[in-house]
Image (cartoon, grey):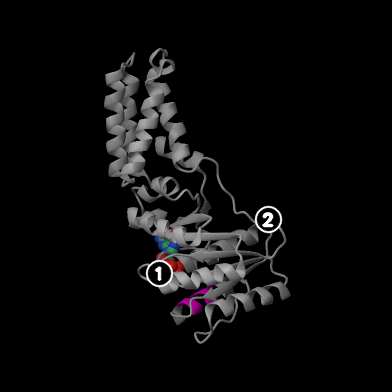
């Protein structure tokens, strides 16, 4: 992931380092190339504009121009601003207060919601939580089967939802059952559609109101680039999400969604899916990713 962006930035920085001294025009040239590299990585144009302006304002300061290693200073600024762009600090799951905690997974069909719910169950179990899975997508019987199978694979209890049940009732009853079973985190896999759908949104709001989740995670396919960001905005408007999971990052060479989503939605990217296997979920660390991008 981020391969081409990484290569592009490396060549920009090589040029910058090559100058003994930097003047305003060298910096402007370098930043023009940074801008193009980000746009080619499919980063939102407004995000790119703000990013380049911030870097420029800092890079044209006396500290950089007067420094003995100005190229190095510019790279340092880009690195710091890239960490900010990716979300600054890592935002862990906010599981505070009295258990059981509720995590609601939301997103379009095919985004990787069901797989990510199971991946999170495994992740949480490794952190000594006792997870419980709730299939609340009653419109696609295959979705219930899929989560039930994944739960069995992990040895995690799964609520026995059926397609004739109401999704809000499922969630309420599942919370009672999870508590009876002594589970500490309830992961709700909500229904998805191919596109944003008013009725579905109302259903999600209903689940939110009844279950009061600590986390509402929006799941999106990283390979859909800026579409993922646009849909995230819509879900955030309606649900006030608490964070994002970007799946299929293993197949996303550009990284545009990951680089835009925090700036556009104001909500942090918390996890990334790196493959189909249940262990292939990683906590998103902005600083590590920025270092990876800058090589
Ligand atoms: P849902 O409709 O949102 O519940 O999506 P699913 O969980 O069924 O996932 C759709 C497809 O994406 C499945 O084939 C998953 O195996 C695949 N998938 C999910 N997450 C990842 C990921 O991080 N990497 C890859 N390569 N495939 C993924």
For mark 1, what is the residue? 109
Q: Quadrant of residue 15?
A: top left
The local secondary structure at tag 2 comes to loop
**Magenta run includes residue 110:** no
Residue at 39% x, 29% y: name it: 55
Range shown magenta: 143-150
Residue at 39% x, 23% y: name it: 59
Residue 13 vertical placement versus 24 (above, below): below
Determine if residue 256 is in view.
yes
Q: In the rendered view of the protein, which quadrant contains the C terminus? A: top left
Pick whichever, 86 or 18, lies toward us: 86
Depth check, mark 1 against mark 2: the one in front is 2
Query: Ligand 1 quadrant?
Result: bottom left
Q: Quadrant of residue 276?
A: bottom left
Q: Is residue 226 left or right of residue 151?
A: left
For mark 2, what is the residue? 96
Residue 235 vertical placement versus 83 (above, below): below
What kind of secondary structure does the magenta stretch mostly adopt?
helix
Residue 138 in the image: x percent, y percent? 48, 80
Disc 2: residue Cβ within 8 A of ligand 1's nearest atom: no
Residue 21 in the image: x percent, y percent? 34, 13
Q: How dense is the environment of label 1, judged by Cα within 10 Å: few (below 14), some, or many (20 and up)? A: some
Residue 127 vertical placement versus 35 (above, below): below
Residue 17 in the image: x percent, y percent? 35, 21
Determine if residue 295 is in view.
no
Pick whichever, 3 or 103, lies toward us: 103
Q: How dense is the environment of label 2, judged by Cα within 10 Å: few (below 14), some, or many (20 and up)? A: few
Residue at 50% x, 39% y: name it: 287
């Amino acid at each position: 992931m981020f391969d081409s962006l990484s290569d592009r930035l490396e060549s920009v920085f090589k040029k910058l380092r090559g100058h003994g001294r930097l003047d305003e025009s060298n910096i402007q040239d370098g930043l023009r190339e940074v801008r193009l590299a980000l746009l080619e990585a499919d980063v939102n144009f407004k995000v790119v504009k703000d990013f380049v302006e911030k870097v420029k304002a800092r890079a044209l300061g006396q500290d950089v121009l007067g420094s003995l290693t100005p190229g190095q200073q510019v790279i340092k600024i880009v690195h710091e601003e890239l960490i900010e762009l990716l979300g600054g600090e890592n935002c862990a799951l906010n599981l505070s207060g009295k258990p059981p905690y509720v995590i609601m997974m939301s997103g379009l069909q095919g985004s990787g919601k069901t797989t990510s719910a199971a991946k999170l169950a495994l992740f949480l179990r490794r952190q000594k939580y006792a997870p419980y899975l709730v299939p609340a997508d009653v419109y696609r019987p295959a979705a219930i089967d899929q989560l039930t199978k994944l739960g069995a694979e992990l040895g995690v209890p799964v609520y026995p939802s059926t397609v004739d049940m109401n999704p809000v009732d499922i969630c309420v009853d599942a919370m009672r059952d999870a508590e009876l079973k002594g589970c500490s985190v309830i992961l709700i896999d909500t229904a998805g559609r191919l596109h944003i759908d008013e009725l579905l949104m109302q259903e999600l709001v209903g689940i939110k109101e009844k279950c009061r989740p600590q986390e509402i995670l929006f799941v999106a396919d990283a390979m859909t680039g800026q579409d993922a960001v646009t849909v995230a905005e819509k879900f955030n408007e309606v649900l006030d999400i608490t964070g994002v999971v970007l799946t299929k990052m293993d197949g996303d060479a550009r990284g545009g969604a990951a680089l835009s989503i925090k700036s556009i939605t104001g909500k942090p990217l918390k996890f990334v899916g790196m493959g189909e296997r249940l262990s292939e979920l990683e906590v998103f660390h902005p600083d590590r990713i920025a270092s990876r991008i800058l090589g």
